[in-house]
């Protein structure tokens, strides 16, 4: 199960490879990986366990089903094949299965899978670089030359068009498609694997130096690739992660060695970007290059005008003129009846994210990447066209909801796991090794709780013994009063 999970996460970024034709359109590598992971989870755990694990998600699931039913009805009403609602239904089924999967491994402390997930960032990064290298070779692109030209000219469009746009051609997409959407999803999937790896490492800390080196190398390289993508939504989602960590440290008044290392690594990275000249390219992309902002503003205003004319039933095809907004695009497609459940879905995700941020001071450290992971689907909902949640968004929401609900079910802050004594079924057994030893602080906390429970039990025993002694004393006094006095017959009294 752990290998299947790692392979699925590693294939999610490979979104420029079209694989097979199907009745719901051409399926790409990341969709096949999602459906394969879903099928394996259902086969291993069964519908009953998955249903029990996702019981808290019933409202969110029903809102999505209601939205899909109305979207399908409106598409049929307007003579549009309901391909997108069918895809979204399959994504929803995958979400339920994967959320239940993360719930079970987080709640039941499935150590072998959690240990494997610590390497999800490294595994995904390796597969992505290999696939991207093949694409560069096939299209004859020199990435170093393109990056150098971008820095010299200070024009971020050179990087987005000549590197990513050109590299993704030849696997089923044309240049118009590859330079607009694909890089956001490719590097968003890499960021998702980084979130999952960070959570797993917090649950099961690495102790060997070589393991820590490869883990940190993957995280740093992944962060650099996210910056190199020049994707505003994905980069902002990644930047919120250290900001959440910093806010938690300031509110709690505690700064750990890991937090200090993150700060120093960020400063060193910024210094390196400034020295290379790439920092000015990033600044130009976010602050001075307003072409993207202006086009999005025009599309949003156009969507609002269309909604006013098609308020009840929609019927507007958003292809080519999308507002790049999950809510507005669905409003245009299906009218107010589709917009209401769409708004409920968005508010559910936003409310969960906000509740995590409001409790950030009291959350355990392992929940920081979980809270940060929810920014990925939220930002993409506000910037992605088509009115459909992407595979990255469904995967991120499945990961977050599964882990959060497992934490609520356990009723306490999750601390780094320790090997269990009993044997487990296949896929849940606990591996031995030096990295499975719990940290000293967690061990002391468990010892203190055990001592406290022993002391309370001893106190209850002492109270019970005292009560027994008092009862015995009262019995003795009663027996003494009942004995006859010497020199008198039984029942007689002294005058």
Image (spheres, rainbow, N blue to C red):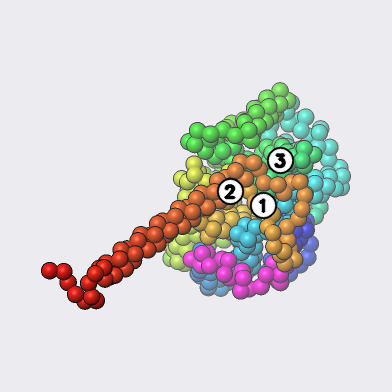
Q: Is residue 235 visible?
A: yes
The residue lying toward the viewer, choosing from 245 and 429, is 429
* Residue 50 pos. (x, y %): 61, 69
Q: Residue 418 carries which label?
A: 1
Circles 2 and 1 in contact, beta carbons < 8 Å = yes
> Relative to 339, is 396 on the left or the right?
right
Q: In which quarter of the image is residue 20?
A: bottom right
* Residue 490 pos. (x, y %): 24, 76
**Above or below 42: residue 436:** above
The CA distance from mark 1 to mark 3 is 25 Å
Circles 2 and 3 in contact, beta carbons < 8 Å = no
The residue that mark 3 highlights is 219
Q: Earlier in the sequence, mark 2 or mark 3?
A: 3
Quarter containing the C terminus? bottom left
Kindly give the residue lying farthest to the left in the view shown. Answer: 495
**Above or below 145: residue 43:** below
Q: Give the crowd class for mark 3: few <14, some 14-19, many >=20 residues within 10 Å.
A: many
The residue that mark 2 highlights is 446
Q: Earlier in the sequence, mark 2 or mark 1?
A: 1
Residue occupying the point 63% across, 66% down:
97
User: In this figure, what is the number of numbered marks?
Assistant: 3
Quarter containing the N terminus? bottom right
* Residue 381 pos. (x, y %): 56, 52
The residue lying toward the viewer, choosing from 410 and 463, is 463
Residue bounds of the magenta highlight: 39-59
Q: Residue 223 carries which label?
A: none
Q: Is mark 1 on a helix, strand or loop?
A: loop
């Amino acid at each position: 199960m752990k290998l299947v999970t790692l392979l699925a996460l590693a294939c999610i970024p490979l979104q420029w490879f079209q694989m097979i034709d199907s009745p719901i359109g051409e399926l790409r590598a990341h969709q096949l990986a999602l459906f394969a992971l879903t099928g394996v989870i259902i086969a291993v755990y069964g519908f009953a366990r998955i249903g029990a694990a996702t019981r808290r998600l019933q409202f969110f699931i029903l809102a999505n089903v209601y939205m899909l039913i109305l979207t399908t009805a409106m598409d049929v009403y307007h003579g549009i094949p309901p391909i997108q609602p069918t895809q979204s239904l399959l994504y929803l089924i995958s979400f339920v299965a994967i959320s239940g999967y993360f719930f079970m491994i987080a709640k039941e402390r499935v150590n072998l899978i959690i240990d494997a997930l610590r390497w999800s960032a490294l595994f995904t990064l390796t597969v992505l670089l290999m696939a991207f290298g093949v694409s560069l070779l096939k299209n004859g692109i020199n990435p170093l030359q393109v990056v150098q030209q971008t820095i010299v000219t200070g024009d971020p469009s050179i990087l987005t068009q000549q590197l990513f746009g050109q590299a993704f051609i030849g696997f089923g997409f044309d240049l118009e498609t590859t330079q607009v959407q694909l890089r956001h999803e490719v590097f968003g999937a890499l960021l998702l694997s980084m979130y999952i790896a960070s959570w797993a490492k917090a649950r099961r800390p690495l102790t060997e130096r070589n393991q820590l080196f490869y883990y940190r190398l993957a995280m740093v390289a992944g962060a650099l690739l996210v910056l190199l993508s020049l994707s505003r939504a994905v980069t902002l989602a990644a930047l919120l992660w250290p900001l959440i960590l910093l806010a938690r440290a300031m509110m709690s008044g505690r700064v750990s060695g890991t937090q200090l290392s993150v700060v120093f690594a960020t400063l060193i990275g910024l210094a390196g970007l400034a020295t290379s000249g790439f920092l000015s390219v990033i600044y130009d992309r976010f602050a001075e290059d307003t072409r993207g902002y202006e086009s999005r503003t025009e599309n949003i205003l156009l969507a609002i005008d269309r909604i006013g004319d098609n308020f009840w039933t929609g019927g507007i095809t958003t292809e080519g003129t999308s507002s790049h907004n999950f809510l507005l695009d669905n409003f245009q497609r299906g009218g107010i009846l589709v917009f209401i459940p769409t708004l409920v879905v968005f508010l559910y995700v936003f409310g969960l994210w906000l509740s995590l941020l409001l409790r950030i001071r009291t959350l355990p450290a392992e929940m920081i990447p979980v809270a940060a992971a929810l920014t990925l689907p939220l930002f993409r909902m506000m910037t992605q066209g088509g009115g459909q949640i992407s595979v990255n968004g469904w995967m991120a929401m499945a990961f977050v909801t599964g882990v959060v609900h497992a934490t609520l079910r356990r009723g306490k802050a999750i601390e780094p796991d320790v090997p269990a004594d009993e044997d487990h079924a296949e896929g849940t057994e606990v591996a031995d090794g030096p990295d499975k030893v719990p940290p000293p602080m967690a061990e002391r906390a468990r010892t203190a709780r055990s001592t406290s429970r022993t002391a309370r039990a001893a106190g209850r025993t002492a109270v019970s013994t005292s009560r027994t002694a008092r009862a015995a004393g009262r019995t003795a006094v009663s027996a003494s009063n009942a004995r006859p006095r010497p020199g008198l017959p039984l029942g007689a009294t002294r005058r």
